[in-house]
Image (tube, rainbow, N blue to C red):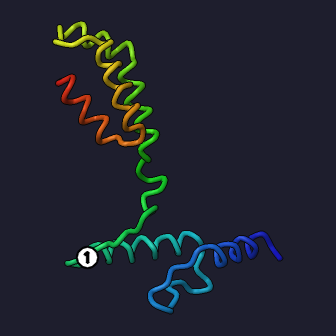
Amino acid sequence: MSENMAQKQVVNDLITFKQGQDSLFSESDVLEDRLEKIRSKMSDLTNIKNLHFLLGAGASADAIPAMEPLIKEVEGRVNSLDTEASIAADECSFSHQSLKDGFQNVKRHSPKNLENILGTLTQSAPI
């Protein structure tokens, strides 16, 4: 089997696109043709009025960061020297240490609830 035939077989095996039971690809479509057909069909579908998407749990996996990495990002910013300098420069009514203490306190009570953490930080350290 030639390399071209092998690549075509891989494309046929791995990339499918169906409307109902009917495949939208022909056997002779190469990768570029298949991708273009997918783009075209998706473009047509998104121009439909009253289009609705029903997504289940996990649909955003790897697309939208989970809470844990976002909490770590918030913690990094709370503890950063840039935040300390910003608080000092703005002559805030709270200290950088009180912000860090407040973060640790709310994180201790709601370790995985980003909304609760951000809500508490916003209330205790208005920006």
Task: Indicate the position of residue 119 as horizontal and vertical percent values.
Answer: 24, 36
Height in image: 24 above or below 98? below
Left or right position of 116 against 75: left
Height in image: 117 above or below 65? above
Residue at 68% in and 75% down: 8
- Quick one: quadrant of the N terminus? bottom right
Residue at 22% in and 7% down: 89
Task: Indicate the position of residue 12 as horizontal and vertical percent values.
Answer: 64, 78
Residue at 52% in and 74% down: 33
Height in image: 69 above or below 46? above
Q: Mark 1 highlights which residue?
A: 51
Q: What secondary structure is found at the residue carrying circle 1?
A: loop
Left or right position of 69 against 93: right
| Residue type indicated by callout 1 | Leu
Q: Nearer the viewer, residue 5 or 52?
A: 52
Quarter holding residue 76: top left
Task: Indicate the position of residue 29 as horizontal and vertical percent values.
Answer: 58, 79
Report the residue that reaches farthest toward the right: 1
Disc 1 residue crowd, few under 14, some 14–19, many 20+, Cα 10 Å? few
Task: Indicate the position of residue 68 as horizontal and vertical percent values.
Answer: 45, 41
Residue at 62% in and 85% down: 27
- Quick one: quadrant of the C terminus? top left
Quarter holding residue 74: top left
Total marks placed: 1
Q: Nearer the viewer, residue 49 or 96?
A: 96
Quarter holding residue 81: top left
Left or right position of 66 against 122: right
Report the residue that reaches farthest toward the bottom: 21
